[in-house]
Image: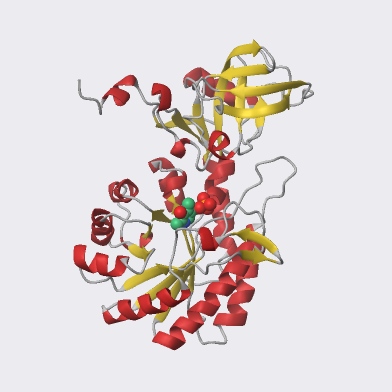
Amino acid sequence: MPFVNGEQLERLCAKFPTPFHLYDARGITENARRVNAAFAWNRGYREYFAVKATPTPAIMELLRSEGCGMDCSSLTELMLCEKLGIRGEEIMFSSNDTPAEEFRLAAKLGAIINFDDISHIPFYMEHVGPVPETVCCRYNPGGKFSIANRIMDNPGEAKYGMTHEQIIEAYRMLLAGGARRFGIHAFLASNTTSEAYYPELAAQLFELAVELNRLTGAHIDFINLSGGVGIPYRPGECAPDIAVIGEGVRRRFEDILVPAGMGDVKIYTEMGRFMLAPYGCLVTKVLHLKHIYKDYVGVDASACDLMRPAMYGAYHHITVAGRENAECSHLYDVTGSLCENNDKFATDRMLPEIKIGDTLVIHDTGAHGRAMGYNYNGRLRSAEVLLMPDGSGRLIRRAETPEDYFATLDF
Ligand SMILES: *Cc1c(COP(=O)(O)O)cnc(C)c1O
């Protein structure tokens, strides 16, 4: 079982109706401290938590108290920060295909704006005003991004960022517009557990930083390695060691930036999954057992609470509460109630024998879990509960009600 013991789980289920997402306050805090320690060699290092992964105020506050900033990509994510009193360079605004009103709110809050495209610079000047003094551009090197001949991703097919030529031109435009401090951002692999990813990405961006500085005279203030650091969703997979990753980035920094006289560059990260995924789980109860051509376990959660398996065929480990050590002797599909046959948390999964009323814990749902929820079939999204270090549970988001569902309708 992840982070919660049987007795705590029973108490939580007596208090909060299932399904609910449960988060581990202690785990989140300790992990954030490991991340900060891994990059403590860099003066000015900051993790900007990718709010989209878990846009819940109590979680954002927990990370903020460990020194994290917030990475936003939409109007409502910016509004969440505004409500929490988060402002200025505590916010990174890394959006794409951005509406003018979102740039306006980001500017009003004093967020660091990360331009996804060169055309957004004149768009910003027309709709918002002069470019900010501190500004970032998102880079897309094109082609394929590989580490030791292993292809990690295909930036040439990705909609994000500027080409090499464009980013040089963008810097010149921004300098002419009055920008003084510059950042470079790139996101070239998703959910990778490779400890070589950040160091390889950093090396590319450090070299680009030196080039941009030489060509344009721009002062490079920070390099934003964005997100993408993965977690082991399957048992037996290895978690990346953030200390090893931080050390790998430090070596590239010493090799490339320090000799260029750029040892004052700050490193930023924008992780969502690595900060939260292992510290959340979805707690759900078994409503029905169905035996036709296969054996189905029907639970009270659905893809509306956790879309990753339906959307990407993602694996999430499942534990049957109270039967952690029982033999996995039965083959099941674990399903929700949507009228969609992909509404399955697991397909052909060996599990201990399951009975109606059992509690199932679906692991690693802390990031991109509740956040990707939706209302198909009129399903209402689940609550969120924070497991406090003293073992108690705090409701940090109530479940949706039919009134919420009806609130947008006109009769
Ligand atoms: C999604 C996203 C992140 C976070 O990605 P993870 O894989 O969750 O770490 C960071 N930055 C940007 C711009 C993103 O879109």
Left or right, residue 86 beside residue 281: left
Q: Residue at x 32, y 67 (%)?
A: 119
Residue 66 in sight in this render: no
- Across and down, in percent, residue 337 comes to 51, 20
Q: How many marks?
A: 0
Relative to 400, say whether 42 is above or below.
below
Relative to 196, say whether 394 is above or below.
above
Which quarter of the figure is the C terminus placed in?
Answer: top left
- Across and down, in percent, residue 404 comes to 30, 26
Residue 170 picture quarter: bottom left
Q: Residue at x 45, y 32 (%)?
A: 384
Q: Residue at x 57, y 73 (%)?
A: 204
Nearer-the-camera pick, 401 or 6: 401
Nearer-the-camera pick, 155 or 356: 155
- Across and down, in percent, residue 331 comes to 73, 22
Residue 344 in sight in this render: yes
Left or right, residue 31 beside residue 64: right
Nearer-the-camera pick, 119 or 367: 119
- Across and down, in percent, residue 283 comes to 55, 26
Which quarter of the figure is the N terminus placed in?
Answer: top right
Nearer-the-camera pick, 249 or 228: 228
